[in-house]
Amino acid sequence: MRGQMTMDRGRNFAGIASRIEGADGQAMQHFMSNSPWSGAGVFEQIREEVRATPELQHGSLLILDESADEKAGGQSVGSLRQYNGRMGKVDQCQVAVVLGYANWKVQPWPLWALVDAEIFLPEEWFGEAYAELWQKVEIPAERKIFETKLELGLKMIRRAKVEHLPFEAVLCDGLYGRSSKFRAKLDAEGVLYMADVPSNLRMYLEKPIIGVPERKPSQKGPKPQQPQVLNGVRSYSVQQAGQLSDTHWQCLRIRTNERGVLEDQFTARLVWTWDKEQSEARQEWLVMRIERNGNHTYAFSNAPQDASLQFLAELLCGRYFVERVIQDSKDEQGWDEFQAQKYLAWEHHTALTACALWFIATTKLSWAEECQRDPGLVWQLEVEVLPALSTANVRDMLRSVMPLPQLSPEEAQAQVVKHLVNRSRSTASRLRHRRKVKLPT
């Protein structure tokens, strides 16, 4: 963690060991890739500490998302040509399903953390072609059954519920939101959600009656078996709903931050949703937003029918903070600089990244308690809100108390010689192995 918090680059196992300890990284590699300590246990500890933090008891949000990192080859656990949201294309990458945690109403500045994560194992990894690689990267027995990203996300939300993690609602992007089954499961478990959906998703302004139509006596062909809308109610895309004449938009202020005021156009209406995943239609809120740059956002929510537009709009805007979780984990903690191949190494690296991010959050809380802000500065600096303590600020303070060691010329020379000798031994070992393989039997 010290390397993740104080170094700016090369934050892989070998790089951290070399920079912090002057070592070749073999012990670090063993600790991260083979040592049986529990990464899941680290996440449990983080959630326990979140649960014990008074400032987070009200207004906190769980935010479900994915995080992808490109990989040069297919030897790392879960690596495959799949959609990389970070790059916006299909590429060789590794994808994690992450559960962020945020509270933007806590004073004096928002807090966010990573409270759970699971690596996504593509369906191809469960075939015979990957059997040998499966053993090599040591995927545990509990992951022997294929799980979709939606199933992984639901599993993590349920873990948070079982452990009584305080949260007001679950927010998620369109990958999860477009699934009516996923939304229905959250609703059945009493979880309030605000789920982004694509602009072409269909819904109804009136309740559709769903059933299998009876075959008319004069009708030829097989008997109808698939359910459909029986009462002729028309469906609309959510984008069309925003353009209807009886859709009224309002300008709402959501929050004030150091960059200014978050203020956009919002509207919401109760609609009915149904697709082949459901046996009957469900009523949900359709919440819509037009940002200042013209971008439109659409989401479904199971909020109560008397929910205010302000409440719905604030939930809709909360998903921004998972971007902070992922960006800080990568840019500030080096999560995307992971280079090992094994499942356990990924789990350990992710857990320590989450631990570092939670340390940042608790430092912000401690700073706010011990270093009271001068309210006169707002007037003096002519701003509405004073800047928040950032992750980069905390890292700068850590560097002052935990400076990176500086090697003497003699120590640097000895380290280089040691690394060269180790690399030579590794090369010689590979060559001996190749010669043995080529020998006739």
Image (cartoon, helix red, strand yellow):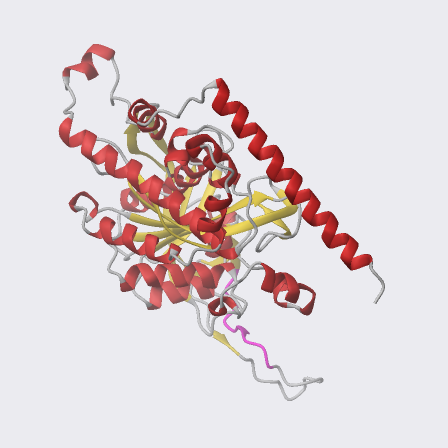
User: Where 393 falls versus 196 (above or below)?
Assistant: above
In the displayed orientation, state which residue is furthest to the bottom: 217
Q: Quick check: can you spot residue 104?
A: no
Image quadrant in which the N terminus is located: top left
User: Where 274 falls versus 112 (above or below)?
Assistant: below
Image quadrant in which the C terminus is located: bottom right
Q: Residue at x 43, y 55 (%)?
A: 35
Q: Which residues are magenta?
A: 225-234
Q: Nearer the viewer, residue 281 or 97?
A: 97
Q: Nearer the viewer, residue 145 or 397?
A: 397
Q: Residue at x 70, y 65 (%)?
A: 129
Q: Give how far across and how far down residue 192 sits, in percent.
A: 31, 57
User: Where 327 falls versus 286 (above or below)?
Assistant: above
Q: Nearer the viewer, residue 437 or 248?
A: 437
Number of marks: 0
Q: Give how far across and how far down residue 7 sits, in percent.
A: 43, 29
Q: Give how far across and how far down residue 401 sits, in percent.
A: 28, 25
The answer to whether residue 294 is magenta is: no
Q: Give how far across and how far down residue 22 sits, in percent.
A: 46, 32
State the predominant SS element of the stretch in magenta: loop
In the displayed orientation, state which residue is furthest to the right: 440
Q: Quick check: can you spot residue 33?
A: yes
Q: Residue at x 20, y 10 (%)?
A: 380
Q: Nearer the viewer, residue 56 or 301?
A: 56
Q: Residue at x 26, y 56 (%)?
A: 165
The answer to whether residue 226 is magenta is: yes
